[in-house]
Amino acid sequence: MGRLEGKVALISGGASGMGSAHARAMVAEGAKVVLGDIADEAGKALAAELGDSAHFVHLDVTHSADWRAAVEAAVTRFGKLNVLVNNAGMVNGGPLGAFAESDWNQVLAVNLTGPFLGMSAAIDELKRSAPASIINVSSIAGLQGMAGLHGYTSSKFGLRGLTKSTALELARTGVRVNSVHPGGVRTAMTAAFPDSAATAPMGRWGLVEEVTGIVLHLASDESSYTTGAEYAVDGGESAGVVHNLGEHLD
Ligand SMILES: NC(=O)c1ccc[n+]([C@@H]2O[C@H](COP(=O)([O-])OP(=O)(O)OC[C@H]3O[C@@H](n4cnc5c(N)ncnc54)[C@H](O)[C@@H]3O)[C@@H](O)[C@H]2O)c1
């Protein structure tokens, strides 16, 4: 028996990067998975690779009608919806004064309003299919500030807060809500940064599979008493100051 036998999951941004790693692992653990993404070709190709256990839908997370259609696809195709992974995201940045209002609005729309719309569209079905789990992919930028990434940081702090408010509201419904906070992970999103730009105390970039491990745990009933929690997957980066001041003391 796989860890996710009998579960049906909807993963936004499931066509590539971390979302695709989560999809592969969930299917391997026995789940049925609906992949939602704006990247239609990559999404269809992954669904074809995963076979009957996967289905692709075009989903722009900023459009509530797309979300409603994605939830309906999960129910029509696989009978229910137990797991929602709000993984789709984007990054932009720029110094205060030069960072455009349109860029601010866009990153908040995708990274914060998107998960809100997703949870809103899915909640009735998640309650019906409980035990159910919502996994909101925030970031280390939802735990601590990042210079130059004002919109991104705000969106990821917002998603962490939305996770808490919804977890509390839903605590007695059988729907759990938790956030995951990756540090620097090697995907298309971080392709521009050299290996030497790794900021984690572990001294390296994370791998998508290392985030998938936590997502599988939260999606499964192994985490049945966990809601409103935040999981850092960041090589120690959010633990504190890595510079060893103790070396300067007697
Ligand atoms: N890579 C990192 O270092 C890192 C660190 C912390 C958090 N994150 C977060 O992890 C999540 C996944 O990121 P990734 O690194 O796999 O990035 P990625 O760019 O590889 O994948 C993001 C996916 O989201 C999709 N997407 C973008 N906008 C969308 C929209 N409006 N509607 C639907 N889908 C959309 C893209 O097409 C893509 O398939 C994001 O929320 C990101 O902010 C990433």
Image: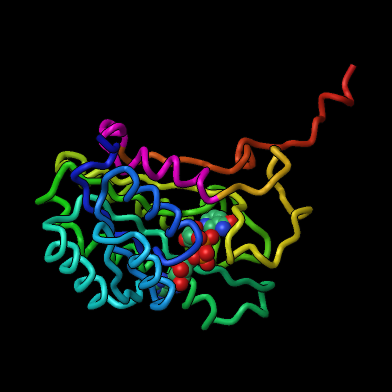
With respect to residue 223, does 169 lie above or below? below
In the drawing, does residue 166 fall left or right of residue 244? left
Segment tinted magenta in the rendering: 208-226
In the drawing, does residue 37 fall left or right of residue 182? left
Q: Position of residue 2 (x, y in %)?
A: 28, 38
The foreground one among 12 and 201 is 12
Where does the N terminus fall, quadrant-wise? top left
Residue sitting at x 21%, y 47%: 7
Residue sitting at x 32%, y 43%: 29
Where does the C terminus fall, quadrant-wise? top right
Q: Position of residue 185 (x, y in %)?
A: 59, 53
The foreground one among 5 and 10 is 5
Q: Quadrant of residue 223?
A: top left
Mark count: 0
In the drawing, does residue 240 fall left or right of residue 8? right
The foreground one among 211 and 50 is 50
Q: Is residue 108 visible?
A: no
Q: Main secondary structure of the magenta part?
A: helix
Q: Position of residue 199 (x, y in %)?
A: 71, 48
